[in-house]
Amino acid sequence: MPAWPRCSRLAAAAVAALLAAALYFGVVLGLQRPVTYPRPPRPPSPPALPAGAEQVWLGPNRDWEAWLLPPGAGGGAPPARGPPRGRGEKKTQHHPGV
């Protein structure tokens, strides 16, 4: 029996193994990021403004939202709420020289 049929079977097995490995690593690497970092859920729709409230956009790019709320039922000053600070600093930090 000649040596070339055995060699071609070995080459075909090597090519098949390389294709299988490439397919496996392609699937693993292709799915790695979506599985590790899934897409966050969609944010809910924005809440409806109370009656008499006004929506204002602030900042240089108009990307900060503010609501001007009407006074409560008992009269008096309108309610006020500041946004959360978000950077980890405390409101009561001591600033020397201020």
Image (cartoon, helix red, strand yellow):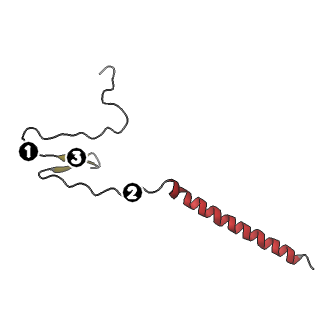
Q: Position of residue 36 (x, y in %)?
A: 52, 54
Up-down relation of residue 76 to residue 28 (above or below):
above
Amino acid type at circle 1 is: Ala
In the rendered picture of this protein, how many numbered marks are placed on residues?
3
For marks 3 and 1 on the same chain, the one whose residue lies earlier in the sequence? 3
Q: Which residue is mark 1?
A: 73
Which residue is depicted at the point 19% across and 51% down?
55
Q: Are marks 2 and 3 in contact (CB under 8 Å)?
A: no
Amino acid type at circle 3 is: Ala
| In front of the other: 67 or 44 | 44
For marks 2 and 1 on the same chain, the one whose residue lies earlier in the sequence? 2
On screen, residue 42 versus residue 79, left or right, reads: right
Up-down relation of residue 54 to residue 87 (above or below):
below
Q: Position of residue 59 (x, y in %)?
A: 27, 45
Q: Position of residue 26 (x, y in %)?
A: 61, 63
Q: Element type at marker 3?
A: strand
Which residue is depicted at the point 73% across and 67% down?
17
Q: CA distance from mark 2 to mark 1?
A: 37 Å
On screen, residue 35 versus residue 64, left or right, reads: right
Q: Which residue is mark 3?
A: 66
**Residue depth check, mark 3 versus mark 1: number of the one nearer the observer:** 1
Up-down relation of residue 88 to residue 30 (above or below):
above
Q: Residue furthest left?
A: 75
Q: Element type at marker 2?
A: loop
Report crowding for label 3: few under 14, some 14 to 19, many 20 or more residues within 10 A (C-alpha): some
Report crowding for label 2: few under 14, some 14 to 19, many 20 or more residues within 10 A (C-alpha): few
**Residue depth check, mark 2 versus mark 3: number of the one nearer the observer:** 2
For marks 2 and 3 on the same chain, the one whose residue lies earlier in the sequence? 2
Report crowding for label 1: few under 14, some 14 to 19, many 20 or more residues within 10 A (C-alpha): few
Q: Which residue is mark 2?
A: 41
Q: Residue furthest top?
A: 97
Q: CA distance from mark 2 to mark 3?
A: 24 Å
